[in-house]
Image (cartoon, rainbow, N blue to C red):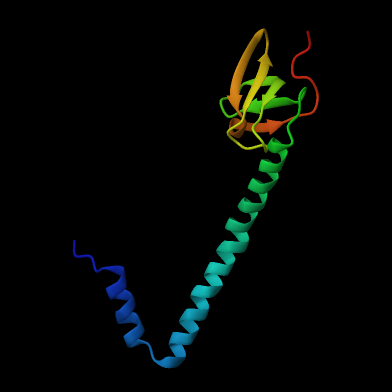
Amino acid sequence: MNSVPVSAALIAILQAAPGGQLTGMIFMYGAIFAIFYFVLIRPQQKQRKQHDALVKALKKGDEIVTAGGLVGEVVAIQAKDAPSLDDRITIKSGESRLIIERGRIVRVGSGPAIAG
């Protein structure tokens, strides 16, 4: 298989296209990028910021679910100066106490996780 480097193919396209077509092609690529940005990239960034704010506002007694699927109640938070995703959180799940990183929390509830 003979493959042409992308830069060489782009140069060939730009040399073959007259001035009016070049402007239209640049507009088309810009429009495609804008669609991708507003449909894919921006919503993901917004959702990530909301999740980070929720996890940083975590408090004792909150019910959480970890990335591994553990469900537990926050017992203690060992934070540094400002809340970060590297902080250690102690949770109670059943009769066990586990230490997890704040960044591994996927979902936060508000009530106690386990009655008893």
- Counting labels gives 0
**As drawn, 61 above or below 1:** above
Residue at 67% across, 14% down: 93
**As drawn, 52 above or below 8:** above
Q: Is residue 67 left or right of residue 24?
A: right
Residue at the right extreme of this rendering: 111
Residue at 27% across, 74% down: 8
Residue at the bottom extreme of this rendering: 19
Which of these two is toward me, 80 or 24? 80
Instruction: Pinpoint residue 53: horizontal percent, then vertical percent.
Output: 71, 42
Quadrant of image for the C terminus: top right
Residue at 19% across, 65% down: 2
Q: Identify the image quadrant of residue 71.
A: top right
Q: Identify the image quadrant of residue 52.
A: top right
Instruction: Pinpoint residue 38: horizontal percent, then vertical percent.
Output: 62, 62
Q: Is residue 94 left or right of residue 112?
A: left
Residue at 61% across, 59% down: 39
Q: Identify the image quadrant of residue 54.
A: top right
Which of these two is toward me, 62 or 82? 82
Quadrant of image for the N terminus: bottom left
Instruction: Pinpoint residue 46: horizontal percent, then vertical percent.
Output: 67, 52
Instruction: Pinpoint residue 87: horizontal percent, then vertical percent.
Output: 61, 31
